[in-house]
Amino acid sequence: MQHVFVYGTLRAGEINDISVAAARYGIAPPTLIGRTSVRGRLFDFGDYPGMVVDASAAPVVGDVYEIDDALVAVLDEIEEVYPGVDGLFLVRETRVEVDGAPMQCRFYPVARESVKGLPEIRGGDWIAHRQCR
């Protein structure tokens, strides 16, 4: 088991809902640990967001799940992360706190150079942004 921080389409109710993805492959459902944030800048790619990590930026809102190790390969496929291949999304680790409990999480930011010319999502919340468009 491990933890993952999701900030975009992997969040509950979104097009790549992490629980739906697990069910589609017969993997144990992820357990929602809670809501938290990671400092960064969120950008609108149209159908999905991309986050650039930036310790001096505002918080980007997301959810932390405990997931079965088998779900990692599914999430990597959704985010098109493949070993030895440079893509849009990166795999990184971040330390977050959920209700005062620190934990290490896997997450999927984008490379800084990939957001050039894209609109920034002020407020750092993909769902709120998408609902207001």
Image (cartoon, helix red, strand yellow):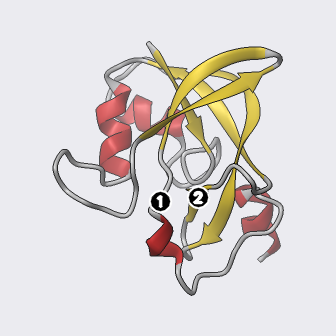
Return the residue nearer the eye: 3 or 133: 3
Q: Amino acid at mark 2?
A: Met
In the rendered image, residue 56, in percent from the top left (x then y), is placed at 75, 54
Give me the disc on residue 54: none
Q: Which residue is mark 2?
A: 51
Residue at left offset 39%, top offset 43%:
91
> Is residue 125 or residue 54 the one in the foreground?
54
Q: Is residue 3 above or below residue 127?
A: above
- In percent of width and height, residue 44 lies at 62, 73
Mark 1 and mark 2 lie on one chain; the one further toward the N terminus is 2
**Residue type, mark 1 in image:** Val
Q: Is residue 4 above or below residue 61?
A: above
Quadrant housing residue 89: bottom left
Number of marks drawn: 2
The residue under label 1 is 110
Q: Is residue 27 above or below residue 11?
A: above
